[in-house]
Amino acid sequence: MTEVTTPRQALLEVKGLRTAFPGEDGPVVLVDRVSLSVHAGETLAVVGESGSGKTMTFLSVLGLVPRPGRVVAGEVRFGGVDLVQLAPAELRAIRGAGVAMVFQDPLTALNPVFTIGDQLVEVIRAHRPLRAAAARKLAIETLERVHIPDPSRRVDDFPHQLSGGMRQRVLIAMAIALGPKVLVADEPTTALDVTVQAQILELLAELRAELGMGMVLITHDLGLVAKHAERVAVMYAGRVVETCRVEDGFADARHPYTRSLLGSIPRLDGPPGEALPAIEGMPPNLAALPPGCPFEPRCFLGRGRETCRASRPGLAATDREGHASACHHWSELAEDAA
Ligand SMILES: Nc1ncnc2c1ncn2[C@@H]1O[C@H](COP(=O)(O)OP(=O)(O)OP(=O)(O)O)[C@@H](O)[C@H]1O
Ligand SMILES: [Mg+2]
């Protein structure tokens, strides 16, 4: 497997990460040898169909894999340590203050019976030994930072008193309150209407610049990739199948799955919020993966081909710098483009 290297030092470097759950016929691997890196001031977009392992990958990074699943191999390098090896208490300290995540489901992420101020203060005090008044002050400042209007009053609101967009801002506030170096935003705009989506993405971009964070944007929306990310990792069946810089490769992909994803949206620069229409066929059953390429049965390039059925392609360098593809026949796509 060839590694894709970038000259600058990464803030977060994931290498060969593997996460499995026990299944009826042995372990089911939901995240399979995923390698990726996040750099300061850059956004890595992670895309792929539903169930491809985007969320599970970052739950694995943060040590939040639900039981009985667990990380079974790999490294997560952050600030000179391997998060996979840390004890739970050490990991809790890094979560929030080092690497923070805005979770996918905004309804379950906020507790309806506590004010947003209480919830922010709880996050802050779990990490910093501040008195109640100082923590509340920091909570209000953080709400201001995510542009909640009149934050010293809204801090005492309950979640249901806020609009969907404002609730998403509160979740972002909870994630950035402790000044993380890396922010993982899991589908931060899926539940919102188009105008509000644009505002949230603008806010994330602003915070990234202001705080110099590295960002991960997990999204179904390929339109967002071109606009908001410098690099992209495409996931299929728990693996990264293609990764490249957005400007010199995404539109001219070297993996048939990515081509199909791109082909199934009207325009790359189209309006945000367009759902990803399904590619023909179903994602594979992870509990019974065939020996060959997991995308083979659905692939316009490889369906029925002996090479594709015989062995599973690893992520390997292509003709372009910093561009890797897990396809036996990526060069045919390159010729196609020329
Ligand atoms: N708690 C769990 N126990 C067992 N399997 C799980 C669990 N959570 C998720 N999975 C499985 O892990 C795989 C990856 O799921 P994941 O949620 O990471 O996908 P995703 O790419 O984030 O999808 P979506 O776009 O729908 O959010 C799926 O096959 C899913 O069914
Ligand atoms: Mg998900």
Image (cartoon, grey):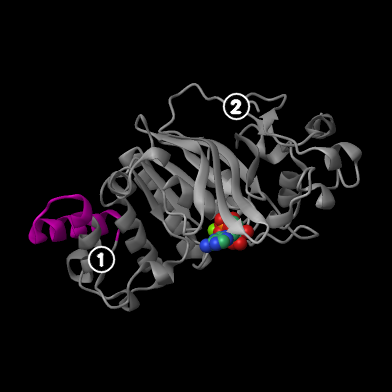
Residue of label 2 = 3
Determine whether 66 is above or below 73 in the image. below
Q: Main secondary structure of the magenta part?
A: helix
| Residue at screen point 52% across, 25% down | 6
Residue 328: image quadrant is top right
**Of marks 2 and 1, which one's residue comes earlier in the chain?**
2
Foreground pick, 155 / 9: 9
| Residue at screen point 88% across, 47% down | 303
| Residue at screen point 56% across, 43% down | 18
Whether residue 218 appears in this view of the structure is no
**Which mark is in front, 2 or 1?**
2
What amino acid is labelled 2 in the image? Glu
Please provide the residue range marked out in magenta: 124-147
- Give percent across and percent down for residue 241: 67, 41
Which class describes the residues within 10 Å of circle 1: few (<14), some (14-19), or many (20+)? some
- Give percent across and percent down for residue 40: 40, 34
